[in-house]
Image (cartoon, rainbow, N blue to C red):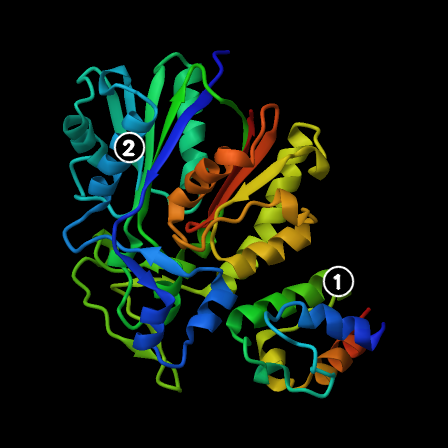
C-alpha cells in the first residue's frame, strides 16, 4: 500500500479580530475576565463582509506554497472542507483550482463537515494516495461561521473564529498518516444547526427567540448550538473514540506523545482530558488568539505544535468531533 | 462517601477561586455557574458516583449539600 504523509501545513487568519473587551461592550454583563476564564479565548479573527471562505482558502493555500516552496503545478487534487461555501454550486474547490493556477488535470471536490472535517479530510486524502489516484493533495479547511451567527448571540460570538488552513498530503513527508476511527450520530443533528436557508426550509424567515430573562436563545436562520447537549455528546463520544483508536494500534495512553483535539473551548477540553486521563503536558491547547475555527482548529494547532513541541519519532493523536454529530481520530507518526 | 471529597469533585467543575465555598453555599450562586457547569457536574456525578441527576433535579436542588444528599439517597 502506498503510504500517505502530511508534508506541509500553513494557515491564514483574517486581519480583524473580535476581542473580549469588544464583546463586553456589546454584552455588559459578560465581562472580559469571565469570557477568557470560561472559554480560554481572548480574541477571534472575523472575516470581512465581502471575504468568503474561498477567499480564506485561497490565502491559506498561497501561504502554504510560499512557506514551503510548493508550486501550484505540483498539485493533482484539491480537497476543500467548508460549511459556508461561496455557492450552492459550482463546487468551491473548482473555483479555487482556477484561482490558484492548479493544472486542469487535477481533481477537486468540496465536502461538508465541521469540527471533524480535518480528520475526515486526511482519511479521504490517504485513500486517494493509497489507491494511486493522487500524489500531491492540497487539502484545505476554510470556515466563516461568523456569517451564520446572530449579532445577539453572546455564546457563539464568544467561541467561533474564521480561518482557513492548507495541508499538503503527499507520498512522502514529515508525518505518516496512520489508521482512522470514525463515527457518526445524526440523532444529534438539531443540536448544532443552521436550520433555514437550504432546501429543507428555504423560504422560512427565522424569528428571534428569547428566554424568560430576555436573553437571546436562537433564530432559526442563524447558527444554533445547544451547549449542554454538545458537552454531553462530546464527553461520552470522545473517550470511547480514543480508547478505540489506541486499542486498534495496541498503544496505551502513555505511548502517545501528544494529543491534539478539536479546539472547541478550553472548559470542555479540560473536562475530557481529565476524564480520559491524559496528562496536561501531552494535551495541546491552542485557541486563545483564534477561538474555535471549526475544521481548522486541528491543523492550526498542529502547525504551532510542529514549531517546537513535536519531535522526530513522536506519535501524535488527532481527534475531531462535533456538528453532525460526526467524529474521528487518526495517529500521525513523525 | 466523603462529603468533603464530593465537594472537591464538584468544585473542580468551577473556574476561578472556590476556596471560601462550603457545602451550604447555593451552587448556582457561584460566579462562573452556567449551563455548561451544570452539564459537567451531572456528568461527573454519573461517571464517579453512578447517579443520574436529571435537569429537573438540578433546577430543584439548591446547595452543594442538597446535591450531596441527593447522590447519597440515589446511590446503588
The residue lying furthest to the right in this view is: B1
Kindly identify which residue carries mark 1: B48
Mark 2: secondary structure: helix
Q: Which residue is depicted at the point 59% across and 72% down?
A: B16
Quarter of the view holding residue A49: bottom left
- Find numbered disc 1 in the image and state the secondary structure of the residue it sits on: helix
- Quadrant of the rendering where the C terminus of chain A is positioned: top right
Q: Which mark is residue A63?
A: 2
Q: Is residue A230 above or below residue B30?
A: above
| Vertical placement of residue A317 versus A235, above or below | above
Please tell me which residue is depicted at 41% across the width and 17% down the height of the picture: A129
Separation (CA) of disc 2 from disc 1? 47 Å
Q: Is residue A182 visible?
A: no
Question: Subunit of mark 1?
Answer: B
- On the image, the x and y values in percent for residue A282 come to 63, 42
The answer to whether A113 appears left or right of B69 in the picture is: left
Amino acid at each position: 500500500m502506498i503510504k500517505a504523509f502530511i508534508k506541509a501545513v500553513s494557515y491564514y487568519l483574517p486581519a480583524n479580530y473580535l476581542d473580549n473587551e469588544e464583546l463586553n461592550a456589546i454584552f455588559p454583563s459578560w465581562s472580559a475576565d469571565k469570557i477568557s476564564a470560561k472559554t480560554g479565548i481572548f480574541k477571534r479573527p472575523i472575516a470581512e463582509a465581502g471575504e468568503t471562505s474561498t477567499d480564506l482558502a485561497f490565502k491559506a493555500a498561497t501561504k502554504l506554497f510560499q512557506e514551503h516552496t510548493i508550486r501550484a503545478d505540483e498539485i493533482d487534487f484539491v480537497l476543500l472542507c467548508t460549511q459556508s461555501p461561496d455557492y450552492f454550486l459550482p463546487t468551491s474547490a473548482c473555483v479555487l483550482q482556477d484561482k490558484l493556477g492548479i493544472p486542469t488535470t487535477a481533481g477537486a471536490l468540496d465536502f461538508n463537515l465541521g469540527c471533524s472535517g480535518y480528520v475526515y479530510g486526511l482519511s479521504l486524502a490517504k485513500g486517494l494516495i493509497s489507491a494511486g489516484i493522487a500524489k500531491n493533495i492540497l487539502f484545505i479547511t476554510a470556515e466563516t461561521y461568523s456569517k451564520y451567527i446572530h449579532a445577539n448571540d453572546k455564546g457563539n460570538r464568544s467561541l467561533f473564529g474564521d480561518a482557513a488552513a492548507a495541508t499538503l498530503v503527499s507520498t512522502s513527508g514529515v508525518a505518516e498518516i496512520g489508521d482512522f476511527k470514525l463515527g457518526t450520530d445524526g440523532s444529534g443533528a438539531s443540536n448544532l444547526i443552521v436550520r433555514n436557508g437550504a432546501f429543507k426550509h428555504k423560504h422560512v424567515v427565522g424569528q428571534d427567540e428569547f428566554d424568560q430573562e430576555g436573553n437571546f436563545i436562537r433564530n432559526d436562520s442563524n447558527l444554533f448550538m445547544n451547549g449542554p447537549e454538545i458537552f454531553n455528546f462530546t464527553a461520552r463520544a470522545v473517550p470511547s473514540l480514543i480508547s478505540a483508536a489506541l486499542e486498534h494500534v495496541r498503544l496505551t495512553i502513555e505511548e502517545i506523545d501528544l494529543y491534539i483535539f478539536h479546539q472547541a473551548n478550553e472548559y470542555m477540553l479540560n473536562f475530557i482530558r481529565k476524564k480520559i486521563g491524559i496528562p496536561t503536558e501531552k494535551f495541546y491547547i491552542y485557541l486563545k488568539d483564534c477561538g474555535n475555527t471549526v475544521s481548522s482548529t486541528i491543523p492550526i494547532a498542529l502547525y504551532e505544535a510542529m514549531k517546537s513541541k513535536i519531535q522526530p519519532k513522536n506519535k501524535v493523536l488527532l481527534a475531531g468531533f462535533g456538528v453532525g454529530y460526526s467524529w474521528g481520530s487518526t495517529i500521525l507518526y513523525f | 462517601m466523603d462529603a468533603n471529597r464530593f465537594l472537591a469533585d464538584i468544585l473542580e467543575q468551577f473556574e476561578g477561586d472556590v476556596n471560601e465555598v462550603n457545602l451550604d453555599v447555593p451552587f448556582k450562586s457561584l460566579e462562573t455557574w452556567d449551563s455548561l457547569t451544570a452539564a459537567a457536574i451531572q456528568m461527573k456525578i454519573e461517571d464517579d458516583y453512578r447517579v443520574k441527576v436529571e435537569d429537573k433535579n438540578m433546577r430543584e436542588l439548591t446547595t452543594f449539600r442538597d446535591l450531596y444528599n441527593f447522590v447519597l439517597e440515589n446511590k446503588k
